């Protein structure tokens, strides 16, 4: 790089830094703010929709809408929830602002790497997936089959969007300040669904160590007392879909910790409600009724008395059969 180019780069960096400072001093949206965004992300080259919060856009792009909730997302500015360039664009913005940001491939999903297209043994791929275009996992890596010839497969391990510049179109819908809405938005970002949540202050008993005198034996067991303390608690009503969500199953501790840190909470409680099995019990009751013929207690007692079984005779018959077997 020539001296002139270096000077221009330094001048541009100073200008960007000045712009960032101006945005922060002017007010508006800042780092760590919760904002609700509507957005659509497309590839620059062929205008393919990559992600969107608009169901109509998804349907037009022939994206499966059955298992995905297309609605605006709550994100935290500066927390890495969106592309860095979009984060920078949001600083200093106001609710109602909209715009389009171009994301270079290097910032999006990386440049295309020829070395990530490799030949592997076809035996490492399930038979049902041995065709061009199949998404496969080989030795713990996700890839896409390009060709299969004989016992060898050519697999592309690059991200499907590697090398693609993206266009991020957005609109800021609101600044989210309610903590329960913030919690729901964070869970929606992690899980692609928003369970019922609420925050309440609970009185909780816990053991605390009593401060000891300086002269007390250091080896002695610390003395404790039971005290009642207030705990700011986030309750999450787990759904069957949530309990089976892989992100939740493997990362629930990290997700809960993030919620506590972001929302200044003491703890998170996840509860699961199992509805009564009225229909099944009713069916079982019907079966029992069928077995008893709908009889009440008196009918059953009378039926038992009518059964003519002599216990002594039954024992004698069994003994005779055993003796006969011995002979």
Image (spheres, grey):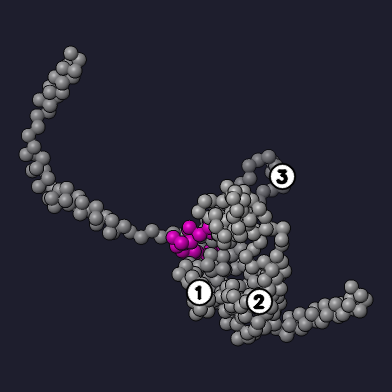
Label for residue 82?
none
Q: Residue at x 59, y 55 (%)?
A: 148
Can the viewer see residue 257 in this picture?
Answer: no
- The question of residue 244 being in magenta is answered with yes
Residue pointed to by mark 1: 62
Please identify the quadrant where the N terminus is shown: bottom right
Q: Nearer the viewer, mark 1 or mark 3?
A: 1
Q: Where's residue 258, x and y in %? A: 61, 63
Label 2 secondary element: loop
Q: Which mark is residue 45?
A: 2
First in sequence: mark 1 vs mark 3:
1
Q: Nearer the viewer, residue 206 or 37?
A: 37
Label 3 or label 2, whichever comes before in sequence order: 2
Q: What are the residue bounds of the magenta stretch?
A: 229-249
> Which residue bears the numbered disc 3?
215
* Circles 1 and 2 in contact, beta carbons < 8 Å: no
The residue lying at 51 percent from left, 72 percent from top is: 63
Q: Residues within 10 Å of mark 1 (few under 14, many from 20)?
A: few
Residue 71: x, y in percent? 52, 76
Quarter of the C terminus within the rendering: top left
User: Magenta segment: does it hold 253?
Assistant: no
In percent of width and height, residue 228 lies at: 54, 58
Judging depth in this view, the residue of 91 and 212 nearest the camera is: 91
When asked about the image quadrant of residue 114, the answer is bottom right
């Amino acid at each position: 790089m020539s001296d002139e180019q270096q000077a221009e780069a330094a001048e541009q960096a100073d200008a960007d830094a000045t712009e960032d400072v101006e945005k922060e001093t002017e007010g508006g949206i800042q780092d760590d703010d919760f904002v609700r965004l509507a957005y659509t992300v497309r590839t620059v080259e062929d205008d393919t929709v990559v992600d969107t919060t608009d169901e109509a856009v998804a349907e037009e792009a022939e994206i499966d809408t059955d298992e995905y909730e297309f609605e605006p997302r709550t994100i935290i500015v500066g927390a890495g929830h969106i592309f860095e360039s979009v984060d920078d664009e949001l600083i200093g913005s106001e609710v109602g602002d909209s715009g389009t940001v171009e994301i270079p491939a290097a910032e999006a999903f990386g440049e295309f790497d020829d070395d990530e297209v490799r030949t592997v043994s076809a035996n490492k791929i399930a038979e049902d997936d041995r065709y061009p275009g199949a998404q496969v996992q080989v030795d713990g890596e996700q890839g896409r089959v390009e060709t299969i010839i004989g016992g060898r497969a050519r697999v592309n391990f690059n991200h499907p969007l590697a090398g693609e510049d993206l266009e991020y179109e957005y609109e800021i819908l609101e600044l989210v300040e309610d903590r329960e809405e913030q919690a729901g938005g964070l869970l929606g970002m992690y899980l692609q669904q928003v369970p019922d949540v609420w925050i309440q202050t609970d009185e909780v008993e816990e053991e605390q160590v009593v401060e000891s005198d300086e002269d007390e034996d250091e080896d002695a067991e610390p003395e404790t007392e039971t005290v009642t303390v207030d705990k700011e608690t986030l309750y999450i009503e787990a759904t069957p879909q949530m309990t089976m969500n892989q992100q939740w199953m493997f990362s629930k501790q990290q997700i809960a910790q993030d919620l506590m840190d972001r929302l200044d909470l003491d703890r998170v409680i996840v509860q699961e409600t199992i509805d009564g099995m009225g229909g099944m019990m009713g069916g079982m009751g019907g079966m029992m009724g069928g077995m008893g013929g709908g009889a009440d207690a008196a009918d059953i007692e009378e039926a038992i008395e009518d059964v003519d079984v002599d216990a002594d005779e039954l024992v004698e018959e069994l003994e005779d059969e055993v003796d006969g077997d011995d002979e």
